[in-house]
Amino acid sequence: GNLAVTYRHLGRYAEAEALQVEVLKQSTKFLGVDHPSTIGASSNLAWTYRRLGRYAEAEVLQVGAVKQSTKLLGVDHPNTIQVSASL
């Protein structure tokens, strides 16, 4: 995840996307969709999709991250607020 975010900050979006897709896949497989790390991975990939102009895909991921975070942590939790701010 951290390397992917670094790539994103450097504008290397294709490389960031490839890593983030894998991180999200593995996080979902081993931790489940309701784990905070999976929610964060989904939000990170959504951010990269926005940078790539893939807005519909970004919205689906980000809305899902907000719903999962709200369900798991509550609407007032800092993580939920953070993923909500990215909508």
Image (cartoon, rainbow, N blue to C red):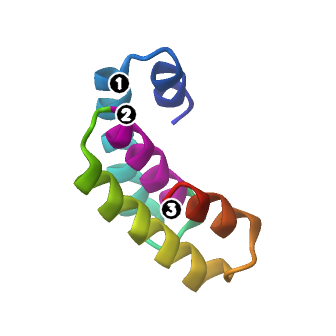
The type of residue carrying mark 3 is Ile
Measuring from the top left, give residue 31's x and y in whole percent: 48, 64
* Above/below status of 77 relative to 18: below
Q: Residue at x 57, y 73 (%)?
A: 69
The type of residue carrying mark 2 is Arg
Dot 3, crowdedness within 10 Å: few (<14), some or many (≥20)? many
- Let me know if residue 36 appears in the view: yes
Name the image quarter holding residue 54. Answer: top left
Q: Nearer the viewer, mark 2 or mark 1?
A: 2
Dot 2, crowdedness within 10 Å: few (<14), some or many (≥20)? some
Are the residues tagged 3 and 2 within 8 Å (C-beta)? no
Magenta stretch bounds: 38-51
Residue 51 circle label: 2
Q: Residue at x 29, y 32 (%)?
A: 52
**Label 2, label 1: how far apart the Cα atoms are:** 7 Å
Among numbered discs 3 and 2, the one appearing first in the sequence:
3
13 vs 21, nearest the viewer: 13
Are the residues tagged 2 and 1 within 8 Å (C-beta)? yes
- Let me know if residue 32 appears in the view: no
Indicate left or right for 17 with 4 as reference: left
Indicate left or right for 41 with 51 as reference: right
Residue 39 circle label: 3
